[in-house]
Amino acid sequence: MPQIDLAGAGVQPATAVAKPKVVARDVNVHYGEKHALHNVSIDIPEQAVTAFIGPSGCGKSTFLRCINRMNDTIASCRVTGRIELDGEDIYDRSLDVVQLRARVGMVFQKPNPFPKSIYENVAYGPRIHGLAQSKAELDEIVERSLKRASLFEEVKDRLDAPGTGLSGGQQQRLCIARAIAVSPEVILMDEPCSALDPIATARIEELIDELRENYTIVIVTHSMQQAARVSQRTAFFHLGKLVEQGPTEHIFTTPEDKRTQDYITGRFG
């Protein structure tokens, strides 16, 4: 069957599946009368990158937002089913949502630095969560987070400058530094490169590959080449349903469902 050219995309080889960090079973999402997600069940392995692909409006971002309960902010949204983080039901009424979002960070489609200095963007989370007992500890967290986000060397002499004054790619890496400053276990990325140029995109992709050694990463992307480059597992969504999931190499070379094949080969989407 026709294939997209994955040789140049550096498709990730299939690897043994790590134990699941996030487990979802029969997840349904309604926005008022609209049934947006239908019975989604998936295991997301730890210390790996899982890519969600599919046409616009297929439910992949909706499901991503379920993992840290961002949909709670939408009055008309109703989520049913079960999602567990390390075996704990994240929709349990006794669960502290603020703590959940510290454990499950999020990076959005467009860089959204706070209207604060570079330093304060990164220090904000650790400060409100009480992760630093002194200014020296806070300085250390900020520096470590910026280094992990591959940004420190570019901004170390202007940490008091506004975060909004950075380039688009730098702003997105600042947002990643902000997310990891509270020591999350999972990082959700909703099309993190869609507003970036190819050079900045390459930097973010390299960063994702480095971060997966310490974090579980889930990325929504419209770029199949990007999914092939950065992920170890891929899930294909269509019309609110999870059609197929598996090792990225398998999904892109020998998909089992014709809808997956048609999307990957460009017949629809």
Image (spheres, helix red, strand yellow):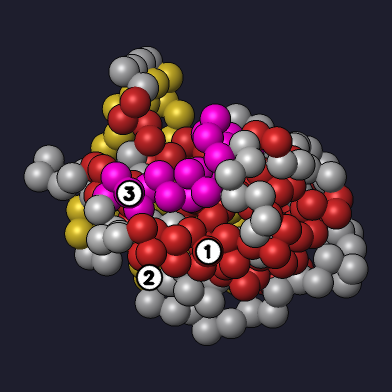
Q: Is residue 217 visible?
A: no
Q: Secondary structure at mark 2?
A: strand
Q: Left or right: where does residue 96 sit relative to residue 191?
A: left
**Rendering quarter of residue 151:** bottom right
Task: Name the residue rendered at 27%, 50% in the picture.
Answer: 129
In the rendered structure, find residue 193 and report the number of the disc placed on it. none
In the foreground, 179 or 163:
163
Residue 146 image position (x, y, % from top left): 57, 60
Task: Name the residue rendered at 59%, 67% in the picture.
Answer: 147
Mark 1 vs 3, N-terminal side: 3
In the rendered image, the quadrant that contains the N terminus is: bottom right
What residue range appears in magenta?
107-129
For the residues marked 1 and 2, what is the alpha-carbon distance in whole angstroms? 31 Å
Question: What residue sits right under mark 1 in the picture?
Answer: 143
Given the image, on which type of amino acid does mark 2 rest? Pro
- Location of residue 195 with respect to 202 vertically, above or below: above
For the residues marked 1 and 3, what is the alpha-carbon distance in whole angstroms? 14 Å
Question: What residue sits right under mark 2 in the picture?
Answer: 20
Point out the frontmost of discs 1 and 2: 1
Q: Secondary structure at mark 1?
A: helix
Q: Is 121 inside the magenta-drawn segment? A: yes
In the rendered structure, find residue 127 and report the number of the disc placed on it. 3
Given the image, on which type of amino acid does mark 1 rest? Glu
Given the image, on which type of amino acid does mark 3 rest? Arg
